[in-house]
Amino acid sequence: MEEDDFILISALQHYSYCPRQCALIHAEQSFADNVYTARGNADHKAVDLEGYESHENVRIERALPLVCNNIGLIGKADIVEFFSDGSAYPVEYKHGVRRPQCHDDIQVVAQALCLEEMTGHVVPFGAIYHVSSRRRREVEITHELRQVVVDTTWAIREMLQSGKMPSVANDARCTECSLIEICQPQMLAEEVKRKTLRKNLFSVEDNCRSC
């Protein structure tokens, strides 16, 4: 693939959460912080600097660059634990308490696909480390999640190449999104509603004339 065709691993999480958020960040280069992103940035300070340490038979790499040429992914892993047999175990840091989040899981699976290509070893599991609860939640790298990563990667690539902005969500996800002031979901949703009402109004008038 050409360099411009590679998709950032972080874009998978953004797209899974909200395609419009993904487009604003990765196509429009728009970003803003709120309390949630600020907390997340603070939580990542411990793993954002490249380096490694060893404990018994485990080598722990921080901020490890990753690439998967097969499907065109590039990014970094917060932590990868390498064991004596050469196998790898990616660990993604997330702010908040331990809870299942599909858009977080596919980020770990994407890291696993990169590590498999880079090391030649199958990566059957990874984990999310939830900083607030200081607990790990293991993620199984299933066939279904692997396919989700592939499909999402191609969906993002097509979205970026098309230049089209996805429709606004205007639902519960927006309340925690740092881009809410840039996206203006309520205003855009109202505009769509007004256009629909105008279209329906003219349709009713045309039907009345034909009667």
Image (cartoon, rainbow, N blue to C red):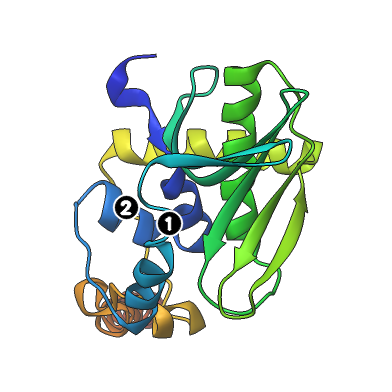
Q: Is residue 187 above or below residue 64?
A: below
Q: What percent of the width, then of the height, locates residue 138?
A: 76, 56
Quadrant location, the C terminus? bottom left
Left/right of residue 130 with respect to residue 40 in the rendered view: right
Q: Which mark is residue 167?
A: none
Nearest the viewer among 109 and 38 is 38
Q: What percent of the width, then of the height, locates residue 110?
A: 58, 39
Q: Secondary structure at mark 2?
A: helix
Nearest the viewer among 57 and 158 is 57
Callout 2, which amino acid? Ala
Is residue 68 visible from the viewing direction of this image? yes
Marks 2 & 1, CB-CB < 8 Å contact: yes
Question: Around disc 2, counting alpha carbons within 10 Å, would you say few (fewer than 14), some (14 to 19), or many (20 or more)?
Answer: many
Callout 1, which amino acid? Pro
Q: Secondary structure at mark 1?
A: helix
Q: Is residue 17 above or below residue 4?
A: below
Q: Which residue is mark 1?
A: 19
Question: Around disc 1, counting alpha carbons within 10 Å, would you say few (fewer than 14), some (14 to 19), or many (20 or more)?
Answer: many
Q: Is residue 172 above or below residue 99?
A: below
Q: Which residue is mark 2?
A: 23
Quarter of the figure with residue 133 = bottom right
Q: Is residue 16 above or below residue 113?
A: below
Residue at 34% over, 81% down: 193
